[in-house]
Image (cartoon, rainbow, N blue to C red):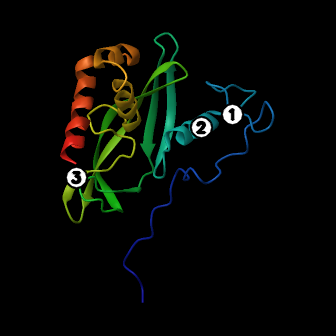
Amino acid sequence: ALSNTNPPPTPTHPPPSAPRHPPPRGRGGGAIPDFPPNQSTGTMEDQNELFEQALDIEWPWYVDRVAPDPVKRLMIIHLDFVAGGTFTCGTCGTGGCKAYDTRVKKWRHLDFFGYRTFLQGPSPRVDCATCGVRQAELTWAGRRQGFTLRFEEMVLSLAREMSVRTVARVVGEHDTRLGRIVSHYAEVGNSA
């Protein structure tokens, strides 16, 4: 009997666990690529894989490109996902949901190499069989709008040792925004 289901789409970008290129060239054979990469140490693909590993990005997500601005000491890591990739519903946790639509968002992340760092990429809504159209779960996204989970964790850790105003000066964010992170997690902790 023939099945009416289509085979899953072939990924255009292999999962991070799959080798995409030969080992990096340069210092000592297994050297970590320079930032930014140059002819003697590796390729842009090496750099993107390094950031995927550092960010724990998993298929269908990948780092599309990294855009540093040395003058402003700012870096934007552009994320994308493989066409046809599936996601987890952010409301009920159902996996295997197809993207319904996307909106580009930006999240403040921990600094890399002394650069104030942001992740930017599509934030898909999924068509969940249980919930309908809902926001996909994004493993890096924090609970507050515009921050990664790791950034929020760092803010909470620092806020245990110093005032929110001091934390704001250290990380270069407005204290009101950081105060909302601290308040949110305090409320969650008090309700548990």
In the drawing, what numbered circle is on residue 79? none
- Which image quadrant for residue 103? top left
Q: Which residue lies furthest to the right in this view?
A: 28
The residue closer to the viewer here, 54 or 171, is 171
Q: Is mark 3 on a helix, strand or loop?
A: strand
Task: List the residue tagged with mark 3.
Answer: 134
What count of labels does the image hold? Answer: 3
Marks 3 and 1, how far apart at CA: 39 Å
Q: Which amino acid does label 1 sit on?
A: Ile
Q: Which amino acid does label 3 sit on?
A: Arg
Picture coordinates of residue 163 (x, y %)? Answer: 30, 18
Picture coordinates of residue 65 (x, y %)? Answer: 51, 33
Which residue sits at x=22%, y=48%? Answer: 192
Q: Which residue lies furthest to the bottom in this view?
A: 1
Looking at marks 2 and 3 on the same chain, the residue that comes earlier in the sequence is marked by 2
Which residue sits at x=65%, y=51%? Answer: 19
Q: What residue type is labelled 2?
A: Leu
Are the residues tagged 1 and 2 within 8 Å (C-beta)?
yes
Task: List the residue tagged with mark 2.
Answer: 50
Picture coordinates of residue 22 (x, y %)? Answer: 73, 45
The residue closer to the viewer here, 111 or 64, is 111
Which residue sits at x=55%, y=36%? Answer: 51
